[in-house]
Image (tube, rainbow, N blue to C red):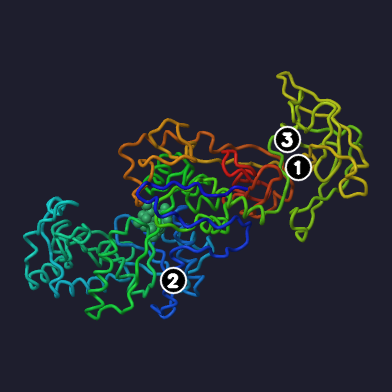
């Protein structure tokens, strides 16, 4: 089975190949494959840099639901900590009072737990540090290392310079410590409207790194914060908050996505100065950057996900087609599958694209190992066994898992009238078709060999009933039953005890690998390098938007099909979230929200074989 990730690299990063994917494994936990982060940590442990401590953090902004990309970051941060007997903190990066909410915090925590990770007592908020962050800001001012700038946002942007031109110092840059301290305290006291001033670090307006050209660290925002209420009307900015939060929590390895590479000198500058002033403890955390997950056939930008929900293209954040973790859960994807996926794609320092089939195959491999087998007839027609007594029945036995005999067998009733799949019969069989056709023989799986004796059609020419006779000497599991070989082997379910069920057949949300990419459909497939415009360089997915077609035009109109099927009675009483292989069809899950005893609803997670024709299973 070919499960190599399909990788695309942009030209500038070709020199650094991604960490090779781990070999395929079904279910079993990973023997860690080497990657640059594991190497760094092993080296730090060897030199005793952090006295053997490994403390990472996962820092989501509570402004939305977690998506598949976050799963990569979670698996990485929690995984590295666990491998090293360390801890991983869950820290809400809640410095933007306008967009954040407790509802999101709870959903984020639930998703991290669902993935199988635990932060123990280490649940924090950046807002826990508002007091320290402000105290440190006054310290920077007192050291002449920060000033209050009264330029407008526009003026500040214009005086920042470019990659080739140095920035121009603001007239406010020469304010005295006394003046700055007074202004900062009055900012904090709420004397000024939004945007009147900002607090900036005084670093270097001519630095070749734009992030070091006196970055703003506090802004005025008269807004109510979901945790601190109206206690503050000035809020610290990300670059300032993040490194200090890391240092206060004694994080050792602060792992973030590539777009923060150019921010690393600022990260180091801030905490090094504070440690020099005795305000933070050494050894300080070290930031490392890895390539974010870019996945074909979905979008992972929060803005687009919001649009999909708000415009009703999907049935909510937990729609099984959404690339959110709440959606994945309802889809029947598994935490183990995500961990397997994360291990297979590895960690690299260069941007790349992973084909959706790699994620689907990880789910398939995990579900193949963990899901019991059941029978569902998705498109039923009646099969009448003419030589079987009317009203009679007998037991047959089917293994719950063909590779795991310890999971036992279940009894299935054989009777005169059965449901079979419509496409397991052909009136005029095509070449290579080995299932039912007039005169043809097949095995009814785990039961008998039957021979087709005829069929009936309705006025429109649709087959309504197929007729057959069975051979009592061929009952599976009895001596000599396997003596006669037939090529076809189909599933069936007795009409009398079949339970009707709603089955939702989900498929990919988009019909092209790069939704919104400008090339005509089919002009490029996922096995060819992506043109640069399709690459979400350095994590700024939205950067591609301006020049794009509308990604909504690429929605797959067949991503959800609801059908009525017949299933084994056991499927009707299984609890929500039970996952099964429906034999010959794929992996299905009892819907978390809508499935109930007597009203079964199943969602398809993945079909048995990849219909998109990549990593065929
Ligand atoms: P988005 O771009 O979807 O809005 P974000 O980076 O703004 O995501 P955060 O809540 O800030 O979302 O992300 C929390 C953590 O998850 C960060 O450390 C971020 O680097 C990581 N992360 C976000 N998206 C991805 C991704 N596609 N691949 C890997 N890690 C990601
Ligand atoms: Mg972010």
- The dot on residue 237 is none
Q: Can you say whether 122 is above or below 395 in the image? A: below
Q: In the image, which disc is placed on residue 498?
A: 1
Circles 2 and 1, Cβ within 8 Å, touching? The answer is: no
Please tell me whether mark 3 or mark 2 is closer to you in this view.
2
The residue pinned by badge 2 equals 41
Residue 509: x %, y % from top left: 49, 40
Q: Earlier in the sequence, mark 3 or mark 2?
A: 2
Determine whether, in the image, residue 3 is placed left or right of residue 244. right
Which part of the image, by quadrant, shows the C terminus?
Answer: top right
> Which x, y percent locates residue 561?
58, 36
Q: How far separated are the C-alphas under marks 3 and 2? A: 55 Å
Residue appearing at x 53%, y 60% in the figure: 114
* Residue 458 versus residue 373 in the image, above or below: above
Where residue 132 sits, quadrant-wise, is bottom left
Helix, strand or loop under label 1: loop
Give the Cα separation between the discs numbered 1 and 3. Answer: 13 Å
Residue at the spot of label 3 = 421
Residue at 64%, 53% in the rendered image: 367
Judging from the image, what secondary structure is the residue with disc 3 in?
strand
List x then y, in percent, for residue 203: 17, 65
């Amino acid at each position: 089975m070919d499960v190599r990730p399909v990788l695309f690299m942009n030209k500038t990063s070709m020199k650094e190949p991604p960490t090779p994917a781990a070999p395929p494994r079904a279910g079993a936990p990973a023997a860690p494959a080497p990657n640059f982060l594991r190497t760094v940590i092993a080296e730090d442990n060897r030199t005793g840099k952090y006295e053997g401590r490994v403390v990472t953090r996962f820092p989501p902004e509570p402004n939305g639901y977690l998506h598949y990309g976050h799963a990569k970051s979670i698996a990485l941060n929690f995984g590295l900590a666990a491998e090293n007997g360390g801890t991983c903190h869950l820290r809400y990066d809640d410095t933007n009072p306008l967009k954040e909410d407790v509802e999101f915090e709870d959903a984020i925590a639930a998703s991290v737990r669902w993935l199988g990770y635990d932060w123990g007592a280490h649940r924090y908020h950046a807002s826990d540090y508002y007091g320290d962050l402000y105290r440190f800001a006054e310290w920077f001012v007192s050291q002449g290392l920060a000033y209050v700038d009264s330029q407008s946002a526009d003026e500040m942007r214009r005086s920042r310079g470019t990659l080739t031109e140095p920035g121009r110092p603001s007239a406010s840059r020469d304010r005295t410590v006394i003046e700055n301290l007074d202004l900062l305290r009055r900012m904090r006291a709420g004397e000024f409207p939004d945007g009147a001033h900002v607090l900036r670090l005084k670093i270097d307006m001519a630095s070749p790194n734009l992030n070091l050209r006196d970055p703003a660290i506090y802004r005025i925002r008269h807004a109510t914060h979901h945790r601190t209420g109206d206690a503050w009307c000035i809020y610290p900015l990300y670059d300032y908050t993040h490194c200090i939060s890391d240092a206060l929590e004694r994080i050792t390895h602060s792992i973030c996505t590539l777009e923060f590479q150019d921010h690393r000198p600022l990260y180091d500058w801030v905490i090094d100065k504070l440690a020099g002033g005795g305000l933070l403890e050494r050894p300080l955390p070290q930031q490392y950057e890895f390539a974010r997950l870019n996945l074909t056939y979905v979008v992972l930008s929060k803005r687009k996900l919001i649009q999909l929900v708000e415009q009703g293209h999907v049935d909510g954040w937990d729609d099984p087609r959404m690339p959110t973790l709440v959606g994945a859960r309802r889809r029947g994807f598994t935490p183990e599958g995500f961990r397997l996926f994360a291990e297979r794609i590895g960690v690299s320092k260069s941007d790349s694209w992973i084909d959706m089939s790699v994620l689907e195959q990880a789910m398939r491999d995990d579900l193949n190992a963990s899901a019991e087998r059941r029978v569902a007839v998705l498109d039923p027609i009646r099969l009448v066994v003419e030589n079987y007594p009317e009203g009679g029945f007998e037991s047959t036995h089917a293994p719950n898992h063909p590779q795991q005999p310890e999971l036992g067998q279940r009894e299935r009733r054989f009777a005169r009238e059965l449901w079979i799949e419509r496409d397991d019969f052909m009136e005029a069989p095509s070449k290579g078709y080995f299932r039912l056709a007039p005169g043809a023989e097949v095995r009814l799986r785990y039961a008998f060999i039957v021979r087709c004796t005829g069929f009936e059609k309705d006025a429109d020419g649709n087959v309504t009933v197929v007729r057959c006779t069975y051979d009592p000497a061929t009952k599976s599991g009895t001596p000599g039953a396997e003596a006669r070989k037939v090529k076809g082997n189909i599933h069936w379910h007795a009409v009398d005890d079949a339970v009707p069920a709603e089955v939702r057949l989900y498929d990919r949300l988009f019909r092209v690998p790069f939704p919104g990419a400008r090339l005509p459909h089919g002009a490029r497939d996922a096995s060819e390098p992506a043109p640069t415009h399709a690459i979400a360089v350095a994590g700024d997915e939205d950067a591609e938007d301006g020049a794009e077609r509308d990604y909504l035009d690429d929605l797959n109109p067949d991503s959800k099909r609801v059908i009525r099927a017949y299933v084994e009675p056991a499927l009707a009483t299984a609890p929500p979230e039970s996952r099964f292989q429906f034999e010959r069809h794929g992996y299905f899950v009892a819907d978390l929200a809508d499935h109930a005893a007597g009203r079964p609803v199943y969602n398809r997670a993945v079909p048995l074989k990849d219909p998109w024709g990549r990593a065929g299973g």
